[in-house]
């Protein structure tokens, strides 16, 4: 048996033998390439002795492992080497006979590699000796070269297989409650579910509107006969006092025409009437017959004196209207007249407008803070802040505010505030019901108006899918029709104060005796 030190020495010797084998794997060979070429051969092809076209090494040097030699050298001096290291120079047991040594591969010749790579057209990679490939050469590492240019992007790869579904993760933390979204569309009617448990009795609903008058009922049964009356001292009927004259009735319809009456007696001769107008002149009479010629007893004499002119005749009748003549030329422009008296100022049409209307989306608002009305119905000018529930006056003028609130589950005490001072307070102790109010206020530019509830016990303002609580207001008319000339009018800072229920201005409560 060998001791532990002998085993160590044997391991060291084995390492030396392996290093010797690695260095002696290749030995010189007389195999050289033939440079003889025929007239029909390729100038870039190398022909080796003992073969026509292929070199003596495998065509694919990268496909298999490197050749290895026998585990022991062939010179037979391994025994002498082991004896030198064994203690006492004792001899080793006889070694088994060694197998015949296989032929060793040729020793690499660098000239062949230089010749192959200096050709105009280098041979293919499967015809280059393995020792000419740098992957099988062990040389010194050169300096790192410069980084090359970035290559073109490759074609996108095919999509990978869909991975398996992972395990279900742990449930995350519950996030904060989000704002209530808008009402969705009505979905399709689902299947009838199973009958649930009978719920608790709900709150009393609001009083419904008065219904239409019902149809006439059937006549009732005839009542029993009344008791026999007693006769007074005299059974004769006594006429009662005449009643008051009634009101004149409406005019009746027009009656039918009556029949023609008989002819009455002839009346007495009437007075002489007025002189009538002259009649129209008669037509010209016919020409009379020519008379007999008279006897002329005249003598020729001088002309007599002219007679006196006759009286002026009456005006002739008015002639017919003649045809319309052509329009004459336009006359010259007259002088400008004096300016008239300035008329009274007419009503103005204000250029600025302001209106809003909004409703709550959550019942029972907090007290000592303006009630927010986030569900905006109209607010085109943006003068109302729905989240804070505060309206800011854009101009000096007269405004109208009103609110309509639903009350349920608790009483309601609500007020309308103007710059931290309550202007209107309303108390509604019955529920469920509704309450409303309207007020006219004069506001200055930058004044603020909002609504508040008194405390948590009297904040019964309610809303659901069937009830809505709204707050509205608008500008009735401004103090001046002139629009602010600057692009950004100077708005005064709002009044500072504390949101509280406070006391109304100028209100005193009489003492109860």
Image (spheres, rainbow, N blue to C red):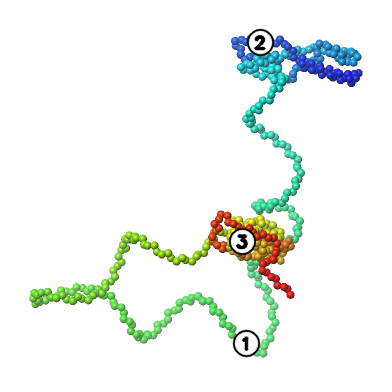
Residue 8 seen in the current view:
yes
Mark 3 and mark 2: span between their CA atoms? 112 Å
Q: Nearer the viewer, mark 1 or mark 3?
A: 3
Q: Which residue is tagged 1?
A: 237
Residue placed farthest to the bottom in the image? 233
Q: Which residue is tagged 3?
A: 473
Q: Is residue 327 left or right of residue 232?
A: left
User: What is the x, y in percent for residue 379?
Assistant: 61, 57
Q: Nearer the viewer, mark 3 or mark 2?
A: 3
Using the image, tell me which numbered label, if any, was put on residue 304.
Answer: none
Residue 460 seen in the current view:
no
The foreground one among 158 and 17 is 17
When the figure is inspected, residue 278 is found, relative to residue 27, above or below; the finding is below
User: What is the x, y in percent for residue 311?
Assistant: 22, 76
Q: Identify the secondary structure beneath mark 2.
A: strand
Residue drawn 40% across and 84% down?
264
Mark 1 and mark 3: span between their CA atoms? 72 Å
Mark 3 closeness class: few <14, some 14–19, many ≥20 residues within 10 Å: many
Q: Which residue is tagged 2?
A: 34
Tell which circle, 1 or 2, labels the residue nearer the N-terminal end.
2
Res. 397 image quadrant: bottom right
The foreground one among 318 and 231 is 318
Q: Identify the secondary structure beneath mark 1.
A: loop
Mark 1 and mark 2: span between their CA atoms? 174 Å
The foreground one among 338 and 199 is 338
Mark 1 closeness class: few <14, some 14–19, many ≥20 residues within 10 Å: few
Res. 83 image quadrant: top right
Tell which circle, 3 or 2, labels the residue nearer the N-terminal end.
2
């Amino acid at each position: 048996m060998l001791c532990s030190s002998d085993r160590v020495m044997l391991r060291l010797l084995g390492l030396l033998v392996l290093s010797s084998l690695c260095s002696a794997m290749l030995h010189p060979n007389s195999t050289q390439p033939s440079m003889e070429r025929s007239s029909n051969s390729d100038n870039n092809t190398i022909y080796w002795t003992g073969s026509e076209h292929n070199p003596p090494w495998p065509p694919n040097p990268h496909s298999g492992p490197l050749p290895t030699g026998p585990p022991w050298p062939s010179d037979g001096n391994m025994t002498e080497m082991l004896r030198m290291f064994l203690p006492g120079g004792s001899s080793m047991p006889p070694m088994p006979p060694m197998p015949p040594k296989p032929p060793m591969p040729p020793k690499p010749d660098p000239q062949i590699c230089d010749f192959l790579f200096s050709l105009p057209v280098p041979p293919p990679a499967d015809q280059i000796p393995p020792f000419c490939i740098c992957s099988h050469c062990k040389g010194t590492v050169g300096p790192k070269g410069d980084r090359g240019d970035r290559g073109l992007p490759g074609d996108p790869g095919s999509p990978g297989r869909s991975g398996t579904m992972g395990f279900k993760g742990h449930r995350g933390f519950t996030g904060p409650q989000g704002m209530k979204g808008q009402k969705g569309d009505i979905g399709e009617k689902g299947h009838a579910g199973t009958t649930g448990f009978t719920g608790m009795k709900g709150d009393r609903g609001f009083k419904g509107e008065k219904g239409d008058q019902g149809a006439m009922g059937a006549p009732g049964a005839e009542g029993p006969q009344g008791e026999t009356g007693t006769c007074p001292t005299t059974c004769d009927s006594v006429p009662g006092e005449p009643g008051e004259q009634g009101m004149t009735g409406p005019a009746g319809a027009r009656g039918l025409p009556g029949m023609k009456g008989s002819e009455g007696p002839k009346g007495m001769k009437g007075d002489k009437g007025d002189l009538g107008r002259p009649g129209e002149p008669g037509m010209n009479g016919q020409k009379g017959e020519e008379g007999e010629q008279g006897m002329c007893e005249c003598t020729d004499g001088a002309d007599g004196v002219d007679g006196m002119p006759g009286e002026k005749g009456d005006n002739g009748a008015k002639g017919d209207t003649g045809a319309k003549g052509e329009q004459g030329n336009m006359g010259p422009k007259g002088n400008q007249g004096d300016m008239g008296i300035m008329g009274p100022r007419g009503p103005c049409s204000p250029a600025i407008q302001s209106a809003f209307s909004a409703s709550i989306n959550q019942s029972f608002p907090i007290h000592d803070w303006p009630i927010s009305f986030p569900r905006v119905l109209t607010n085109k000018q943006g003068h109302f802040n729905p989240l804070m529930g505060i309206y800011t006056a854009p101009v000096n003028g007269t405004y109208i505010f009103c609110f309509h609130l639903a009350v349920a589950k608790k009483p309601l005490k609500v007020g309308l505030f103007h710059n931290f001072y309550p202007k209107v307070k309303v108390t509604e102790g019955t529920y469920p019901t509704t309450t409303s109010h309207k007020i006219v206020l004069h506001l200055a530019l930058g004044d603020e108006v909002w609504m508040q509830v008194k405390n948590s016990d009297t904040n019964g303002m309610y809303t659901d899918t069937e009830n809505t609580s709204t707050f509205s207001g608008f500008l009735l008319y401004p103090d001046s029709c002139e629009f602010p000339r600057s692009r950004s009018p100077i708005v005064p800072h709002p009044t500072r104060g504390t949101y509280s229920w406070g006391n109304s201005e100028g209100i005193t409560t009489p003492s109860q005796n």
